Each structure stands twice: as structure tokens, then as C-alpha cells.
Amino acid sequence: MEVLVTVAVALVLWKGVQLVLQGALTAGDLLIFITYLKTAFKPIRQLAKYTGQIAKATASGERVIDVLDTIPDIQDTRGAMDAPQFLGSVQFDQVTFAYKGGSSGALKHVSFTVQPGEHVALVGPSGSGKSTLVSLLLRFYDPVEGRILFDGHDLREYKVDSVRRQISVVLQESILFASTVRENIAYGNLKATQAEIETAARLAKAHEFILKLPQGYDTILGERGATLSGGQRQRIAIARAAVRHAPIVILDEPTTGLDNHSEHVVNEALNQLTKGKTTFVVSHNLQATERADRVLYIEEGRVLEQGTHPELMALKGQYAKLYQLQAKVYPIRTKNNGGTNAIAI
């Protein structure tokens, strides 16, 4: 378009100069005509610019439609029913799972039972299957073999949405939206009232700093919570999990990257969130497992050791070796330094 405009102006100028020299036009007439010509080309330039933007938007829209049209691999089975309110009992019965294209199974014949309200730690090296186990709990995948039972019933008997509504998740990097604080917390439960939102915020130790924001609960956050500190973002995420009133809680490295003060405050909030609930925490910090009701050590997709922290230390197996290795690298924290009762996975 720019080339065409340049060529057109050059041709008009060349022909206009000839007419001026012949006396058919004055120099002023030529100048006015060129000015009109540039004005006429202005909307054409804009149209060309918008055409490029429309092409990009169309391609983006097609991608969004492709995502929306994607059929999840996990579907409600025929006859699936809405899950009742869970008590919190979770059982893995000879569960085996492998990702598509994977050379070996991510989990191999994993069996254990978690009682309602129990805090159990699943620990192990990276790639041992901890995240896979949590993904199976949320039913992002189904086991290749074996069963996962909630309160004695196979997870596949229930509708997917009804199961996920009863599980709260706090990630290492929780996603916050460019919306109000109130709406970010209520995302955990869209039917939550203002009183329930404030109660959840108080439980998460977030109420006080929220009130100090320019518009309080109506303050618009930056994209992904960029206007908040890491500790504040995690407390908003904890409040979002608390407003769900879910009997099962999954925590994925919730204090990683926080300073000591923020970690202490977040741990206090996590203690409140997980009180009386079946809780799973993904964490490589073995010092956070000391208060767990039970510790499961996973390696290469298998549960190699299980028991309380003192029992596994007395066993002097892989868990004890890994714990002692961490103790040499990192100072042992005191129990008053905000240690969470939640399970470390």
C-alpha cells in the first residue's frame, strides 16, 4: 500500500509539474491537488493497517475455537452420578499409570489408604510420580490399571465436575486475574457471598492487607496479580481455596520462593486451611514432613517406604538419606518458624 501511494504521488507530481510549465495549472493548484490526494489516501492506509490486525485476530480466534472444540480425554462414564459430600477418605488400589508415548509407567501398582482429615506426606526425587498422583486425584487422567476410591467408591462412578468441586488446590504460582480482589477470591466458589469471601480472607491472613489496598476488596489487580507481592498472591490463592469449603486440599510447593516472613504468614494460613481436612502438599522440603501423620516415599513410580517421620528415620532407608542430605545443605528450621501441618508430597 505504501509503495502504491508513493508511486501515485510521484506520477501526479511529475504530470502536474509539466502542466505548470505549460501554464495549464498554477503551482498553488498543484500543491492543493497533492494535499487532497494525500488526504484521500489516509483512510486507505488505515484500511490496510486494520486488514493486518483483522487477519491476526482471525487467526487467534480460530485457535481459541480449536481449544474450545477440543474434547477432553476424560469424560463422564455412562450412568455417572453427582458425587455426594465427601468425608475425605482416599484409597489407591494397585494404581498403574503411564503417559502416552512414555517409555515406562509414571506410577506402578501404587496402593495406600488415607483416612478423613489425615495429613500424609508423599516425597521423593523429581520425576518420581508425585505430580502424576495429584493429577489422578483431580481426574485429569484415569489409571491404566487399578482404582482410586473416594469414601469407598470408584472415582469414575462420579461426574468429573462434581469431584473437582470438592477439591481445593493451591499452586506454587497461583493464577490471579486482572479483576477485583473479591472476584479473584470468589472464583473458587462463584456463589460465595461477601461474608463468605471475607471469612475466607481472614482465614488466609489476607483481610488486613486487602483493606489497605486503594479500594479494598474492589481493588483491580494487575494481570497474574503483578501488583501484589508473592506472599500476598499466595494468601489470595489460599482464600480462594478456603471459600470452596472442600474436604480435600492439594498444595503444590505453596511457599517456594517466599521470604522468611511471608513463608511464616502463609504457613499459618495453610494450617488454618488444612485443619480437619485430607491434605496433600507437593514439596521437596522434607523438613515440612516432620508433623505429617504419615510419609510415603515414592521413587520411579513406586511407594518404597511409608510411615511416620520418626519411623522412616529409624528405618535408615532412602527417605532418611534424603532428609539427612537436605539437613546438611539447609539449616534445620525450628518448629516455631511457621511449619505447616499439611502433608508434603
Image: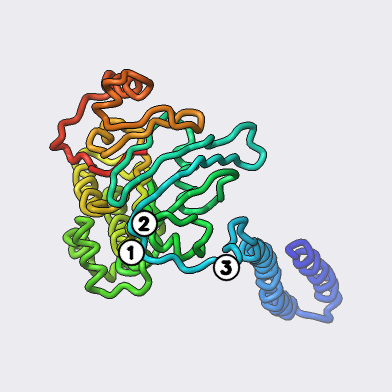
Q: For residue 48, which numbered disc appears in the image? A: none
Which quadrant of the view contains residue 15? Answer: bottom right
Q: Measure the alpha-carbon separation of dots 3 and 1.
A: 26 Å
Colour scheme of the rendered structure: rainbow
Q: At 63% across and 36% down in the image, what residue appears?
A: 102
Q: Disc 2 on helix, strand or loop?
A: strand
Which quadrant of the view contains residue 227? Answer: bottom left
Kindly check if marks 2 and 3 are in contact, taking CB atoms under 8 A apart as contact: no
Percent of width and height locating residue 142: 56, 50
Q: Disc 1 on helix, strand or loop?
A: loop
Q: Which mark lies nearer to you, 2 or 3? A: 3
* Placement of the N terminus among the 4 image quadrants: bottom right
| Amino acid identity at mark 1 | Arg
* Sooner in the amino-acid sequence: mark 2 or mark 3: 3
Kindly check if marks 3 and 1 are in contact, taking CB atoms under 8 A apart as contact: no
Residue, disc 1: 244
| Amino acid identity at mark 3 | Gly
| Amino acid identity at mark 2 | Ser
Residue, disc 3: 79
* Sooner in the amino-acid sequence: mark 3 or mark 1: 3
Kindly check if marks 1 and 2 are in contact, taking CB atoms under 8 A apart as contact: yes
- Between 135 and 213, the residue placed more toward the observer is 135
Q: Residues within 10 Å of mark 3 (few under 14, many from 20)?
A: few
Percent of width and height locating residue 285: 31, 32
Q: Is residue 329 above or below residue 44?
A: above
Residue, disc 2: 168
Percent of width and height locating residue 45: 69, 70
